[in-house]
């Protein structure tokens, strides 16, 4: 458990790039859905719930957030277990190679 938490912190920004999720609120929640599917992270559940609650409290539309959650969760189920890869040792590798190896989509919508 400690190893996974450490790896999630260490690779968080790299995984943003690999998955194509932005660093805005919707992108962060999408990435947490990816983490939930990959690692069953209780923190991811809390952050997703918090994001949904804030969206409702701010009277904002839920569609973009729900789409990001769905996309992130599905992507996480299909991908290799990202925390097991030494992503930080592969700066010279093209993104397309990493995405292919990790079974992440190449074209990000």
Image: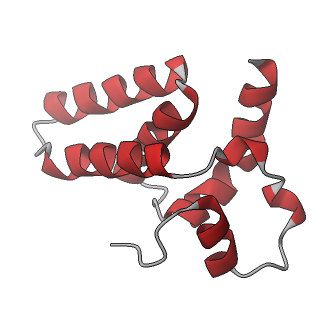
Rendering quarter of residue 91: bottom right
Question: In x, y percent, where is residue 96?
Answer: 62, 80
Viewport quadrant of the N terminus: top right
Please state if 96 lies on the left or on the right of 66 as rendered. Answer: right
Please state if 58 lies on the left or on the right of 36 as rendered. Answer: left
Q: Of 33 and 53, which appears nearest the observer?
A: 33
Q: Residue at x 34, y 49 (%)?
A: 26
Question: Can residue 25 be spotted in the picture?
Answer: no
Does residue 39 lie above or below 91 as drawn?
above
Question: In x, y percent, where is residue 49?
Answer: 32, 24
Please state if 28 lies on the left or on the right of 4 as rendered. Answer: left
Q: Of 10 and 18, which appears nearest the observer?
A: 18
Image coloring type: secondary structure
Does residue 23 lie above or below 81 as drawn?
below
Question: In x, y percent, where is residue 101?
Answer: 66, 66
Question: In x, y percent, where is residue 25?
Answer: 38, 47
Q: Residue at x 21, y 43 (%)?
A: 66
Q: Residue at x 73, y 48 (%)?
A: 11
Rendering quarter of residue 59: top left
Please state if 100 lies on the left or on the right of 51 as rendered. Answer: right
Question: Can residue 107 be spotted in the picture?
Answer: yes
Q: Residue at x 46, y 61 (%)?
A: 22
State the residue lying farthest toward the right.
89
Viewport quadrant of the C terminus: bottom left
């Amino acid at each position: 458990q400690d190893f996974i938490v450490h790896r999630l912190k260490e690779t968080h920004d790299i995984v943003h790039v690999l998955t194509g999720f932005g660093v805005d609120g919707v992108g962060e929640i999408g990435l947490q859905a990816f983490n939930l599917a990959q690692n069953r992270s209780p923190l991811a559940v809390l952050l997703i719930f918090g994001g949904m609650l804030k969206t409702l409290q701010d009277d904002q539309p839920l569609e973009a957030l729900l789409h990001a959650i769905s996309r992130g969760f599905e992507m996480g189920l299909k991908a290799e277990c990202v925390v097991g890869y030494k992503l930080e040792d592969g700066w010279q590798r093209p993104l397309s190679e990493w995405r292919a190896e990790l079974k992440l989509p190449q074209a990000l919508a």
